[in-house]
Image (tube, rainbow, N blue to C red):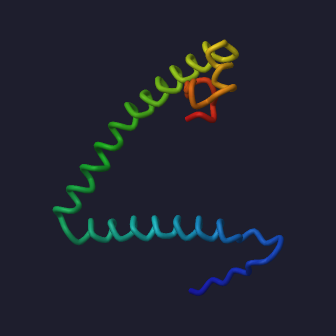
Amino acid sequence: FICTFQMGKGNIMTPQNLRSVAALATGCLWARFISLLKSTNVEIAVFVTGVITVSRRLSAFVMALLVILLCFAQMFFTVYQKTERCNLYDEDPIKNFFPFCTVKGG
């Protein structure tokens, strides 16, 4: 089927939104292609199933790792917020580089 989008003022389909839709469609097409390969080749099916299984088992570990990382980042931010060390950062960011003094530093 053919889709046409009008790029005009007040239209939802801006060039950025169109690129996002195209990227999502590309991902869906690749997933469909891998699914097709799985149904035609046993070795690829075993490999893809193994990758999916490992990814599912590692997802809990990755989530816990992200939570721990965010906890420590919040602790550093809370401890050093509004201290002399971070006030120096505001004055001269080249001489006193402490990326944990601001959220924008990361």
How many circles with numbers are drawn on the protein?
0
Q: Position of residue 60 (x, y in %)?
A: 40, 32
Residue lying at the far left of the rendered structure: 43
Q: Nearer the viewer, residue 22 or 89?
A: 89
* Quadrant occupied by the C terminus: top right
The quarter of the picture where residue 16 lies is bottom right
Q: Position of residue 80 (x, y in %)?
A: 61, 15
Residue shown at 66% from the left, 84% from the top: 4
Q: Nearer the viewer, residue 96 or 49?
A: 96
Residue lying at the far bottom of the rendered structure: 2
On screen, 19 above or below 57?
A: below
On screen, 3 above or below 16?
A: below
Question: For this view, does 100 lie left or right of residue 84?
Answer: left
Q: Position of residue 100 (x, y in %)?
A: 57, 24
Q: Nearer the viewer, residue 69 or 36?
A: 69
Q: Nearer the viewer, residue 2 or 5?
A: 5
